[in-house]
Amino acid sequence: MESSRFVAGGPAEAAAEIERLRRANDALVSRVAAAGELPQGAEGARRAFLDRAELVRRCADEPVTVGVLGVHSTGKTLLLNMLLGRPDLLPSGYAPTTGNVTVLHLRPTDEPGESRLTGARVEFLNETDLAGCLAALYEAVRETARGSGKLDQRALAELDGLLPEGADRFTAEGWAGLLRWFEESGWAAGSTALRLRILELLAFRTACLAGRDVLGREEQVDFATLSASAIKLDTDVLRAAQGPLPPRPGPGLPIRPGARLTEEGLAEGFAFIRRIHLDVLVPTAVWPLGELGAESVSLVDFPGLGSLASKERDAYLADQEIDRLTSIVIMLDAESPYDEAPLGLITRFERTRSAKLAPSCLVVANRLDRLPGGLRAAEGAPDPLHTEAVLGHSDALRTLLGIAEQAVTHGHTDRVTLTSALYARLLAEGDSSPVEVGDAETTLACADGWRRLAQRLNAGEPGRPLGALLGAAAADGGIQRLRDTIARHVGEHGMPLRLDRMTRLIADRVDAQRDLARAVRPEGGRPNGRPTPEQRELRRLLVQVARNARGLLPAVRPQMDQAEGDAGLRAAVEERVVDDVFRWPEWRQLLEAVERGVVPIRQLDRRELRPNDTGELEKSFTAALERLESQIVDLDRTLLDRWIDAREEEAADLRRQISALVQGAPEGDPAVLDWVEPFLSFGWVRQEVERVRAAAPAAPPPSGPPGESEQVQDFPLRREHGLPWHPEYPVPHGWPADELEKRRHQIQVMAVRRELVNALTRKVMLQAERRRRALVDDVRAALGARLESLPQGDYGRLAAEALGVGRRSDEAALGALVESLVQNQGQGDL
């Protein structure tokens, strides 16, 4: 059964138990540390035990920590600013909160005024984290290379063993072999996805050559230095990835400990940054942090996962942070209400954990003012107004709330908040707000609509959540409700959740205790008639195989999503869409014509400036759709192989351990383990799926109009309409003199391009999702049939039969240290 992160008892009981466990942990550590010299081979076991015990101690002492997790461009930075009561505290697009885990250490003050930054520090990776992160990136390059289908076996084999290790990481010679493979084989393959992963790994080469001396250190930095120049933007990286030749990395500018960090130095060492630490003084009048029940509070702003420039690095760092969080705030984007990518992030983190994260999660759906279709249609519903009527007029809102409830488990709408950080900013800044007039007017009109709907919902169905959600959004953009929700969640569940995490860390420490006790137990210390350590270990492995096998059926879909990337199928589709749309010649013509940020209207070559109207863009749109749909067919051709490879890689360690135990037991019976093999090697799944598909008749294409769930936006622009950067654009009467120039700014060209990307993504996603559902169903059917062969019997007996009786020995007295380890296990025996 999966663990729920909740435990019995309230916050006070949990806090008392945490303190008791901390004291017991400290006492045990003291006894182990004071044991003096241990028998040969036991020192490694002692170090492993002390490392696990240190994690237990840190868990007991850590502050209340609230993490904010989401994908790119959901308005996360502005929302954090509004939570802290100051719209300009962290600039939007600010590098640390865009590209790094940023920890805001909040300290309350009774002084009046605004929240303010009082210090900034950069924490760099230590060598252990560097090794783990490099290994993750290198594996991502290998996986992408294999999945591209554009490299032969020789080129793939040449990539093996090229990742520099140890001191070689910090020399140009150590990277020479990998750099040569990138230039001669990897780049030449022409896969944009592979080139992006290559560029990300090369960023670590630059950092390794520049910043070895700062590994594991924290350095003070001026806040002004932490600017957008410290990172590569996705558009820059994508442009580099589409170039004919790979960029040649430079030698790296040395970053010296204690020296003033510059923007150039941060840019060189960006890949090495573990966390950015910002100290923030928060007036009690803005946010009474004491309500969170702790002396110190930290807000952890995760990088927007899914970045083209630092995708694998960001995911690795986020995975290291997630267990430290008291509460997890998941950011949804109301402008993209059908996007389940944030749920994919949580699924990704759960794959390596035995516990569900839902009890730790809150959800904020930001940019409510950008909800497709708005809520104006719902205002026409008659009174008494009910939630079903509002949702019936807005499928976008219905879907958004459904995704939110999935993240926190159904029924917990008290953990959901609808927000508009832009509306909160308008209220805070009033007439001085720099928000453009059109956006401000639209947002204010939306807020008036939310207020009217909330009043009617509260009158028609008092106590239902939607009225409260819309009312809070209309009051202040939902900011106060979000603060209250965080405080309530931390107060009610913070300590129980911490106790649950501490209990799981203690379980890991207990494993290390057992290993240490075995290492120091005198020879011949096993009592008669009890299983040998080998038999107990094999039984544990067999139970793990069975547990993994039974967990495969519900996990097939999320595992398929993982095979395409951290954000699932949508990320794979959007990558192809972006790659296609960004290559259209229209953008090059328009952006190369830009002068002072504006596409000019020239008198002599007006016919040369393309496109003239949306009709030309629609032709490109239609042609791209045909290309992309054929590409999506290719997605599933390698997906099943990648799923099989991933399952076999997950099972590799189990296979190795079981094989070593069985081969080392001449008296045993290896045949008893034949049932294990199908769940350690999955090639048979491919054969079964191919057999079933070959035998099944071809499915007819869907007929009739698409169902409601299949309706997607077509070409998103107004058809056959002029575009503002062309001389014949019909300027509406009464426009201000500078309005046309605003609409001809290069940012408008990029906005049109993004609209086309979004529309193509939605259309192609429909077909891709149909294919994915069919593949998942076929794999699940194959697994379901094979699970019938899974034994339900005594795994201890199976282990004994596989290994034979083995050696038994007389019981011997354990030393004082072993007795301490046994007595403090809290579960089981040795």
Image (tube, grey):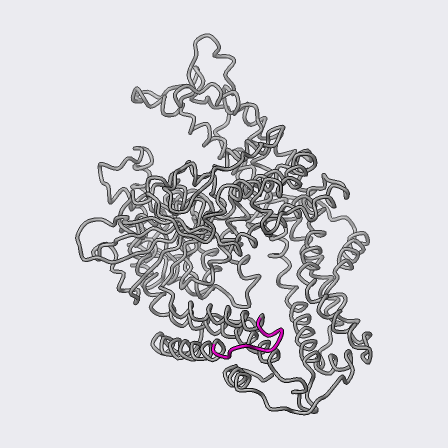
Residue occupying the point 47% across, 78% down: 34
In this view, the residue farthest toward the front is 37
- Residue 375 seen in the current view: no
Residue 792, quarter of picture: bottom right
Q: Is residue 256 left or right of residue 85?
A: right
* Residue 250 % position (x, y): 54, 34
- Residue 419 seen in the current view: yes
* Residue 136 % position (x, y): 59, 52
Q: Is residue 246 above or below residue 457?
A: above
* Residue 30 % position (x, y): 44, 77
Residue occupying the point 73% across, 79% down: 799
In this view, the residue farthest toward the top is 604
How many discs mark residues in the rendered view? 0
The residue lying toward the viewer, choosing from 139 and 478, is: 139
Helix, strand or loop for the magenta stretch, by majority: loop
Q: Is residue 245 above or below residue 119?
A: above
* Residue 35 % position (x, y): 50, 79
The residue lying toward the viewer, choosing from 662 and 481, is: 662
Q: Is residue 81 magenta?
A: no
Magenta-colored span: 34-43
Residue occupying the point 42% across, 51% down: 123
In this view, the residue farthest toward the left is 112
Quadrant in which the C terminus is drawn: bottom right
Residue 177, quarter of picture: top right
Q: Is residue 458 above or below residue 28?
A: above
The residue lying toward the viewer, choosing from 281 and 479, is: 281
Q: Is residue 679 left or right of residue 588?
A: right
Quadrant in which the N terminus is drawn: bottom right
